[in-house]
Image: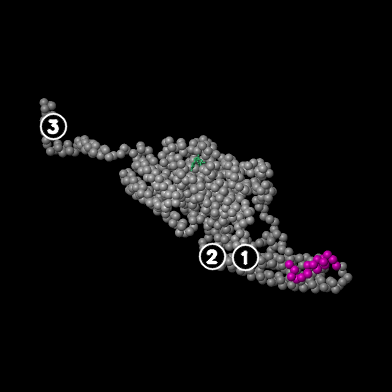
Amino acid sequence: MPVSTRWQLSGDLFQSPARQKTILRNPHQGLKEKMKALTVLYEQHKQPLAPTHHPSIDLLDYNHKRFREDEKQEQENEKKNRDGAAVIPRMKPKYEAKENHNLNIASRKAGKPARAPARRSSMGSVLEGGRGLTACKKTSEDSEASGDTGSRIMVFVRLRPMGKKEEAGSRRCVRIANRRDVYLTEFASETDYLRLKRVRGRHFCFDAAFPESTSQQEVYLTTTTELVEGVLQGRNGTVFCYGATGAGKTYTMLGTLENPGVMVLAIKDLFSKIRQRSFNGSYSLLLSYLEVYNETVRDLLSPGRPLVLREDKQGTIAAGLTQYRAYSTDEVMQLLQQGNRNRTTEPTRVNETSSRSHAILQIITEYQVKESLNVDTRVGKLSLIDLAGSERALATDLRTQRSIEGANINRSLLALSSCINALVEGKRHIPYRNSKLTQLLKDSLGGPCNTVMIANISPGHFSFSETQNTLHWADRAKEIRTKASSAIDETTDIPETGQTKLLLVLQKENSELRQQAIRLQQKLLNLQAQALSSQSPQQLPPPPVHSSPRLSTPNSTNRNPKRSILGGGNCFGTPDSAKRANERVTQELQKRVKELEFENKRLRKEHGVQLKQKDDFIREIISKGAQKPIDREGMNLCNDDFKSSRHKFASPQPTAKKRSFWDISSANSPAAGITNGRKTRSHVAPQSPPPPSMILPV
Ligand SMILES: Nc1ncnc2c1ncn2[C@@H]1O[C@H](COP(=O)(O)OP(=O)(O)OP(=O)(O)O)[C@@H](O)[C@H]1O
């Protein structure tokens, strides 16, 4: 009964509309049906679906395919070019648009708007709908339009080939197109569902980007040859390599014996050009090589005590740094090798011979050229810098020494990035003093210098974050503008307006008058002294009273304080305040000139009277004859002294020469250190070991 009743009951209930409603609302019932429907749908769509993977893999595979095609096309073009055939202009690769499209799809799938708002216009992301490319075009157009290519830091990127070890497990995350566009793709793990949504590619654009196959010669010709030309014209130039450990900085800068790098090629170029251009065949090429290791500066060509950095008019110098006079490229190569042997290198997890220091090679050139009738001496400085790896300490090694090095490398590179930031943002204070490296790079970043930055990157996806970091800073450095690149003294920066010219003329007149007044005053004092020595107190004329406190000897401590042309030297004053200060100074100078002229007249007059008195007095003495014994010496002196009223007095003794760095020790003097044509100013020269054997004359 209970069973039949149950059946019956259930059957009844099933039949009733209320029960039917309950069943329809039952979630379990609906789920079953939905599952069925989904299974059918899945079966229908199963065939066309690819195996589950991240869209970025699609993108990369697609890009690689296209990239290979692109490379093939480029190679064909180059071949045609070599063969003399007409070069077909390359079309804008289609895959760029496809890439954006792909990523837009990826982001739409991930529930994000297709176009994320641009964070910064200069750094392009492929998600930004090609904004990076636009920004890049704008940058180059900007510089071209303003015609100030020399004042903007030129930024290049070099991608090194995959290493043998990397080839096994690493995937390429960097692609270079059009010789200037760099595409960076981030890989995410297939199981990393959180990051899956945030996978994105980045696009950067630089002055030039070198793919793996680029030769050392090509890198040199594109990045440094113009700088070398500038150095020969008398402008300073700097090339520095930046990048993570093992990214190829030392390879780019120094290279190998078979494939010499920028340093060697630049020196070769300098030698050959300087020899061609030197007017009388005489020239000098001075070389110094130093490293900054753990915030100490060391001489790589003559290792010894750490060097102290000093600031002078020419910029920051390492006091006591050895300078070698080089005569041939071979000699320079040997010097560089020797210097590099002294450089601190350690194996790290990433690089077997990782440079743990920043190395700076400086070459000062001097030669003479004949232009029309004049002989012009040209002096230029080229600095070639191989920075230590920019990776985080953890990326290299955890051991203490390496960690300290890493911290110091990071400290100096952090200081470098702070300086780059401050320069880009146009801040007044640039924190150069935060590290030795930035102190040494002060000239190159913010001074009158042509500067090139080569950012080295690795292709493997294991180095993704380091590569991204390098590209970020390289992109930022693009915005730095150095001062107008000429090796002219700072004072010439002041516009030569009429007012400035007037000021200069007045200053010159002022100093001339001052000298004249001093001479007259001395002459008078001499006369008085002579009169005193040859005259009795009764006959002595009253001494002239010089009440003017403005007249002083060069040694006087009562000098007027020096006034800067720009009113107290405040370089941060507004143009109005500077103008007002200029006017004030002009007025003051004019007043001073008038005073001096008046003083001069008065002194001349007094002088005339004095001379007349003296003549009378001498005549009187002579006429008295033997009445009084004459001091022959004094007489002679007087006679000599009064040959003519227009007699010129000797100018005052020059003040003692200011003690310069070279005077500190005789061993430091350039003259003292010259042996066999080599110039040494090492502070440890007397005790220092003999110069490198390879450059000793045989
Ligand atoms: N363009 C290139 N072509 C061929 N090999 C390269 C290239 N760039 C780098 N390499 C090789 O990669 C390795 C690492 O390069 P390198 O020592 O120059 O890196 P690095 O950036 O100076 O590293 P670190 O900062 O640790 O000193 C070297 O074996 C070098 O020969």
The CA span between labels 2 and 1 is 17 Å
In the image as oriented, which residue stretches furthest toward the right? Answer: 626
Q: To which residue does mark 1 refer? A: 507
- Magenta span contains residue 387: no
Residue drawn at 52 percent across, 56 percent down: 483
Residue drawn at 39 percent across, 48 percent down: 125
- Local crowd at mark 1 within 10 Å, few (<14), some, or many (≥20)? some
Between 670 and 13, the residue placed more toward the observer is: 670
Q: Is residue 121 visible in this depiction of the protein?
A: no
Q: Which mark is residue 202?
A: none
- Local crowd at mark 3 within 10 Å, few (<14), some, or many (≥20)? few
Amino acid carrying mark 1 in the image: Gln
Residue drawn at 15 percent across, 38 percent down: 21
Q: To which residue does mark 3 refer? A: 10
The residue segment tinted magenta is 630-648
Between 374 and 231, the residue placed more toward the observer is: 374
Question: Which badge, 1 or 3, comes first in the chain's sequence?
Answer: 3
Amino acid carrying mark 3 in the image: Ser
Q: To which residue does mark 2 refer? A: 579
- Local crowd at mark 2 within 10 Å, few (<14), some, or many (≥20)? some
Q: Nearer the viewer, mark 2 or mark 3?
A: 2
On whether ligand 1 comes within 8 Å of the CB at mark 1, the answer is: no
